[in-house]
Image: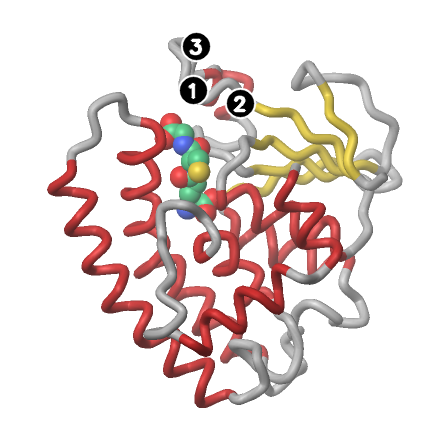
Amino acid sequence: MPKHQIKTPNEQLSSPYIRLFSYPTPNNEKVTILLELLNLDYYSYQLDLFSESTEQYEEWYTKVNPIGRIPAIEHANANGTKTNVFESAAILQYLSDKFDKKRQFSYGSDSPHYYVQQEWLCWFMTSLEPLMTKQFRQLLIEANPDMVVVEQAAKDAVKHMQFFEKRLKKNCTGFLVGDHLSLADILAYPWFCSAVVPLDGEKYPAMKSWVDAIGDIKEVKIAMKK
Ligand SMILES: N[C@@H](CCC(=O)N[C@@H](CS)C(=O)NCC(=O)O)C(=O)O
């Protein structure tokens, strides 16, 4: 099994290894999907984010991620040299550059699809992702959600989903970029099957087929359960 749960953040591991700092949210699922697809062994430590301890702001963790958010990884290579990466899109790019040499789940800089993948990654991270994070926080974490914020974020998200639908129809392959699954799909997928973003299959048929097809992939199913 690729995943190993660890109970303490600094558990001694023998190199090479990937230590994932996690919490079960869509931002984390993006990373677990790629780790599972690449069949990589990884050690997952779940931080205590939302209780009073707010472990993410402890000094040891701000050395991994100065912003105090999950996901983040520590990768130790065979020589024991460690690299920390935070921000889900940067982690996906790091993992694919290191471990997806055949480019089965990504496009490398030598591909004509590379900058298209980058466009969709940047668009998603700067436009849709902050709206969805806002909704997620209000609905699933705050004791008294501010419904004005939730409704505004939902309206804005719907506007953006129209671009997404058009792109899938234009590309015509069932994927956002090129003709196979890539970082663009992996990054966006967990949000569209999370409870905070109800997807209307009649209005967004291309997105509905895309969600269903990705959700059918064995490794994606495993990653979404973890
Ligand atoms: N843009 C960041 C977002 C990360 C993020 O917002 N993570 C949330 C959980 S999904 C978090 O760690 N929240 C802790 C906090 O807000 O204190 C990414 O994609 O990695």
Residue labelled 2 has its Cβ within 8 Å of some atom of ligand 1:
no
State the colouring used for the structure image. Answer: secondary structure
Residue at 56 percent of width and 77 percent of height: 175
Check if mark 3's residue and mark 1's residue have beta carbons within 8 Å. no
For badge 1, the amino acid type reads: Tyr
- SS of the residue under disc 2: helix
User: Alpha-carbon neighbours of circle 2 within 10 Å: few (<14), some, or many (≥20)?
Assistant: some
For the question of whether residue 67 can be seen, the reply is no
Question: Rounded to the nearest whole Å, what is the CA distance between mark 3 and mark 2?
Answer: 13 Å
Residue assigned mark 1: 57
Q: Which residue is mark 2?
A: 61
In front of the other: label 3 or label 1?
A: 3
- Where's residue 83, x and y in %? 67, 40
Residue 4 picture quarter:
top right
Q: Secondary structure at mark 3?
A: loop
Q: Which image quarter is the C terminus in?
A: top right
Marking on residue 53: 3
| Alpha carbons under labels 3 and 1: distance apart | 9 Å
The outermost residue toward the left is 148
Q: Is residue 205 above or below residue 72?
A: below
Q: Nearer the viewer, residue 122 or 157?
A: 157
Residue 131 vs 13, above or below: the answer is below
Counting every numbered tag in the picture gives: 3
Please state the quadrant of the image where ligand 1 appears: top left
The residue located at (54%, 53%) in the rendering is 90
Disc 3 to disc 2: CB gap under 8 Å:
no
Going 87% across and 27% down the picture, which residue do you hit?
Answer: 14
- Residue at mark 1: C-beta within 8 A of ligand 1: yes
> Is 52 placed above or below 90 here?
above
Q: Is residue 21 left or right of residue 161?
A: right
Q: Choose mark 3 or mark 2, whichever is in front.
A: 3
Proximity of marks 1 and 2: CB atoms separated by less than 8 Å: yes
